[in-house]
Amino acid sequence: MSQSIIDAVATSHDISQEQLSVLLHTDDMMLVQTLFAMARQATQRSYGNKVFMRGLIEISNHCRNNCLYCGIRRDQSGLQRYRLTKEQILQCCAAGHQLGFRTFVLQGGEDAWFDDDRLCDIVSDVHAHFPDCAITLSLGERGRSSFQRLFDAGAERYLLRHETASPMHYAQLHPAEMSFDNRMRCLDDLKAIGYQVGCGFMVGSPYQTDASLWADLQFLRRFQPQMVGIGPFIPASGTPFADRPAGSVDLTLRLLSIIRLILPSVLLPATTALGTLSPNGREMGIMAGANVVMPNLSPQGFRAQYSIYDNKLASGSEAAECANDIRSRLNGLDRDASPDRGDFRP
Ligand code: 5AD
């Protein structure tokens, strides 16, 4: 009976709230294993054995926002703030290129110092020096004309997690000055401009419910992003949610598989948060249908300062300089780290 739920989700690319509840809460481990296997098959049909590697460069931990969950929020005290220079960013890219990366993700807090002129200058220099690479930005909410200028300068992809598709839940995770509608406006603008867009959410964030998760999945179905980033919530000391329990690895894996069945060709990272909560979290993510890894390419001396949550991994398989380790660990899972840019293939 329950097996038929998985078949129904896989063929309709949709899920009812009741079906979601069963798949999230069943303690029938055979059923969960079947879910993972079906998701792996869907990944295989879309991308074969390829897993795509993205080099993550954390360009600034300054942030104007005060998201209740985030360790680099504006009110976080005792945090050394930093921002990378263009030269440092280009050096990271050069090191990454040498290691075989063909996508660079420039990620940062919402730092007003990185205005359009400065960012466009950086993006066009990265583009000119590494014309065979894709540039992904993950710099939060901006105006439409800003997104357009960055696109024109050579950025092709943008990651902006929607965080939750429930406006009520959004208001429980963010201060009143932040707006769900503006988040959605940004995502729509990015799509309209022609970016490959990534959205996503944390699993197990405070106040999350089965209903809000179902709303997230409905949003994904409607929005049809090219990428979806999900990872467990992990408490960050010093934040209002410091004492909340972390999200569950198991639930994250189930959701990765469900997202894979709903959006068979989406690019789905096995995130750092998953790897932080469990020593082989990222491997389990791949076995649940993920097909992207994003190791850290930031200068070593700054990694600890990009502390969006406690104990965030930035070494071992999370470190870009260990690209060859990562490749062999993927080979152990019967996967190959792809040497190409890893564009979305509808
Ligand atoms: N735990 C897990 N993920 C977090 N993020 C921010 N803070 C945390 C946390 N405490 C996620 C958010 C954000 C992305 C950059 O990291 O979803 O969009």
Image: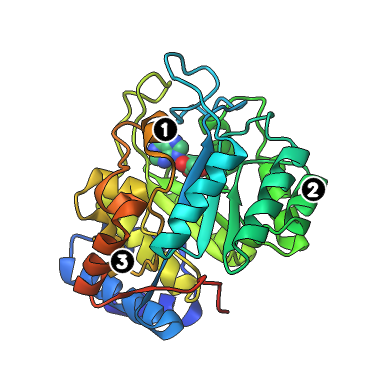
The residue singled out by tag 2 in the image is 144
Please give the label number shown on residue 302: 1
Of the residues under marks 2 and 3, which one precedes in the sequence? 2
Residue 71 x %, y %: 43, 28
Mark 2 vs mark 1, CA separation in Å = 30 Å
The residue shown at (19%, 72%) is 332
> Looking at the image, which is closer to me, 156 or 207?
156
> Percent x, y for residue 140?
62, 41
Picture quarter with the N terminus = bottom left
Residue 101 locus on image (x, y percent): 45, 63
Residue 314, image quadrant: top left
Q: Quadrant of residue 306?
A: top left
Between tags 2 and 1, which lies in front? 1
Q: How busy is the neighbourhood of tag 1: few (under 14 within 10 Å), some, or many (20 plus)? A: some
Is the Cβ of the residue at disc 1 closer than 8 Å to that at disc 3? Answer: no
Residue 286 marker: 3
Give the residue displayed 28% in from the left and 50% down from the top.
275
Q: Are marks 2 and 1 in contact (CB under 8 Å)?
A: no
- Residue 313 horizontal/vertical position (percent): 30, 42
Q: Amino acid at mark 2?
A: Arg
Question: Which element carries disc 3, helix, strand or loop?
Answer: helix
Secondary structure of the residue carrying numbered label 2? helix
Name which of mark 1 and mark 3 comes first in the sequence: 3
* Looking at the image, residue 186 lies above or below residue 197: above
Ligand 1 is within 8 Å of the C-beta of the residue at disc 2: no
Badge 1 amino acid? Phe
- Answer with mark 2 or mark 1, whichever residue precedes in sequence: 2
Residue 153, above or below 300? below
Type of amino acid under label 3: Ile
Residue 320 seen by the camera:
yes
